[in-house]
Amino acid sequence: MTYRFDFVKHRKKYFIVSAVLILLGLISLFAVGLNLGVDFKSGTRIQATLGKTFSETEVMQVVKNAGLNPGTVLTAGVQKDIAVIQFGEPIHKDEITKLTKTLQDKYGKDVSIQESTVNPMVSQELARSAVYSVLIASIGIVLYITIRFEFRFAFSSIIALLHNVFLVITVFSLLRIEVDIPFIAAILTIVGYSIHDNIIIFDRIRDNLKHAKLKTVQDIEDVVNHSISQTLARSINTVLTVLICALALYIFGGQEIRNFTLALIIGLTFGAYSSIFIASQIWVSWRERDFKSKKARPVNNEA
């Protein structure tokens, strides 16, 4: 079989790089944790339509003038005229009324307010639901790939999937970017694209195995290298197409979807990497171990 690059030869280096990144993520999570948004730690989010462009610093000061201490102020809306004000603790209705009047005094009587408050019980339920959604998706993927291919493919895919998700979480932890419900939507989207890339490569490996005569470990490596080479252009083009759209959303979209698109960009990048350099390499390592074990097994010659 012909291929331009020996992907399998350097698999230990890929594993080391990923191990270092995961270790960095663990240190970050234990040291500083995640910057959880209102959705997961309770609080109040106010969406104020001001009807004109504004400065986030200016709105922050207006809110403080109303006697409140906002956590963050973000810009949203196509016209950049919506202020998303988030508070780390739930605020009372009379405080919201006072804030509305203060904003109207500053920006005009047409200012409208939409308020959503998440109490601790709801935030805990949202956090549990987010974890369950990822676990259910993972279990479904294992069952599908095991039935469609084999358990070794399924196990390799799940390890690569968890690798991608954890590295996205690592980046958000290191940069102290807020984690909210759209972030979970991005994670589930990343799961879908990552598995899609893995299945493309694994499907080609399975087809090439049907026509290969595996006499040595090198034969297995040749099949994997050839399969990756055959699907490389398709994998890159698929990811680039989605990345271009995600980048456009990140640059031109509103603040409300910026964290979602950023998580998507990071996840798609790691997903493309893991499909080629992690999932397929875990599979070939496992397959080689089983191949060597079978070769080393003594043959009983019974009369």
Image: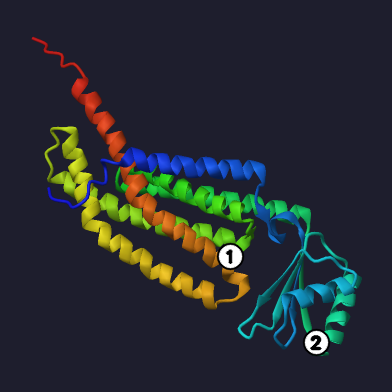
**Residue 229 in the image, given as x and y percentages of width and height:** 22, 54
Q: Measuring 69% from the left and 83% from the top, which residue is drawn there?
A: 81
**53 lies above or below 280:** below
Q: Measuring 55% from the left and 76% from the top, which residue is drawn there?
A: 253
| Camera-nearest residue between 10 and 192 | 10
What crowding class fits label 1: few (fewer than 14 Cα within 10 Å), some (14-19), or many (20 or more)?
Answer: many
State the mark number for residue 159: none
Mark closest to the chain's N terminus, 1 or 2: 2
What crowding class fits label 2: few (fewer than 14 Cα within 10 Å), some (14-19), or many (20 or more)?
Answer: some
| Camera-nearest residue between 209 and 289 | 289
**Residue 151 in the image, given as x and y percentages of width and height:** 34, 40
Residue, far top: 303
Instruction: Give left or right: position of 197 versus 55.
Output: left
Mark 2 element type: helix
Q: Measuring 60% from the left and 56% from the top, which residue is drawn there?
A: 175
Q: Measuring 42% from the left and 43% from the top, which residue is drawn there?
A: 17
Instruction: Give left or right: position of 269 versus 236.
Output: right
The three-letter amino acid code for the residue at tag 2 is Tyr
Residue annotated with mark 2? 107
Instruction: Give left or right: position of 66 versus 204.
Output: right
Say whether residue 60 is visible.
Answer: yes
Whole-number angstrom distance, CA of label 1 to CA of label 2: 28 Å
**Residue 163 in the image, given as x and y percentages of width and height:** 46, 46
**Residue 121 in the image, given as x and y percentages of width and height:** 76, 53
Residue annotated with mark 1? 259
Instruction: Give left or right: position of 6 versus 122.
Output: left
Mark 1 element type: helix
Say whether residue 114 is visible.
Answer: no
Q: Quadrant of the C terminus?
A: top left
